[in-house]
Image (spheres, rainbow, N blue to C red):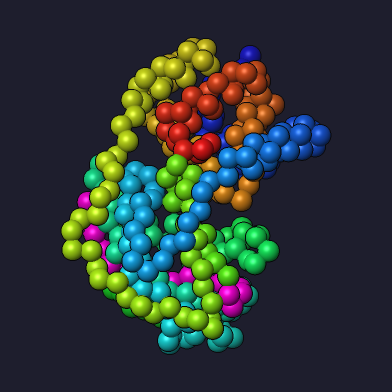
Amino acid sequence: MKRSILVLPIVLGLALAGCSNSSDDTTEAAQASATTASTASAPAEVKFEVGDTVTFGRDPIGSATLLSMEINPECEYPSYDPESTDARMGRTTHVALEMSVEAGQGGTFINIPSLSISERDKDGYTANTLAHSEDRADCYSYDDLLSTVSSGEKQRGWVLLAAEASEGEFVWNLQQGGKKVVIPFSTSNPNTSTAAAPTAAANIPGPRQVDYQDLADKLTEIGQESTPVTAADAKQMAGLMCGLIELDPVQDGATDRMIQQLAADEGIPEDIAADMINTMVEYECPGAGA
């Protein structure tokens, strides 16, 4: 007898981390298939330069304008200091981004230090850790740093990133329809130009309206649940699933691993597991497969 799909939050985390209990052959085949599919539908990337504005995030959607960019800003404890946290991590280049950020209405808040920004080297390899610097408080006062932007709030401040290389690019997963922007940097050509702060509110799309009760009813029907799935549970499961996919862009085949995990550990037939996952993608994160 299969267990309830309410175990999905745990299963999704295990699946995305690659902790499947299925055989190596099955996992490799699924990953190869997913890699082929993701290569064919790789998200578009554009440069994010001074003066540009992008929308990003989910619940709420935010808008960010890049006002200026500074390479290795003056810091009380610069990154080459042996005691520097970033230096011990092998990341000796600092890139400071000054941005104007606005969080749309209808959500909770945007946590700037958790934005999905990673370093990518000249060979095209993306780091598996975020690029946010641990030395930011040694370079800027907390009043100057972007931190938490509440729903409907607008802030102007700095984000400090750290890189291993002296030149390269950062990749920012905008979590909006699979879109990404790249931020090139080079210590030999620091860009410190400044754009005027936007005077009017940015054109931020309104929050997506999702009928979570309808989603819950569909999941109950698909999973043949004896206890109906609630709207709150459906929202939690769909949000967690989409968030895991969006925040871990370096892994291929995440949804396939989720389906396999449900089938292997929960006894749910793969076609039913796939139907549940695809239904949540359709409702909550339609851009994840774009």
At 32% across and 46% down in the image, what residue appears? 60
- In the figure, is residue 106 to the left or right of 121? left
At 49% across and 85% down in the image, what residue appears? 78
Helix, strand or loop: magenta stretch: strand
Q: Is residue 155 visible?
A: yes
Q: Position of residue 215 (x, y in %)?
A: 40, 22
Q: Position of residue 59 (x, y in %)?
A: 34, 43
Q: Nearer the viewer, residue 134 or 36?
A: 36
Residue 173 higher or lower than 284, as above or below: below
Q: Position of residue 129 (x, y in %)?
A: 58, 60
Q: Is residue 155 inside the magenta stretch?
A: yes
At 51% across and 49% down in the image, what residue appears? 44
Q: Quadrant of residue 286?
A: top left
Residue 283 higher or lower than 124, as above or below: above
Tell me the magenta residue range: 150-167
Q: Nearer the viewer, residue 223 or 58?
A: 58
Name the residue at the right extreme.
25
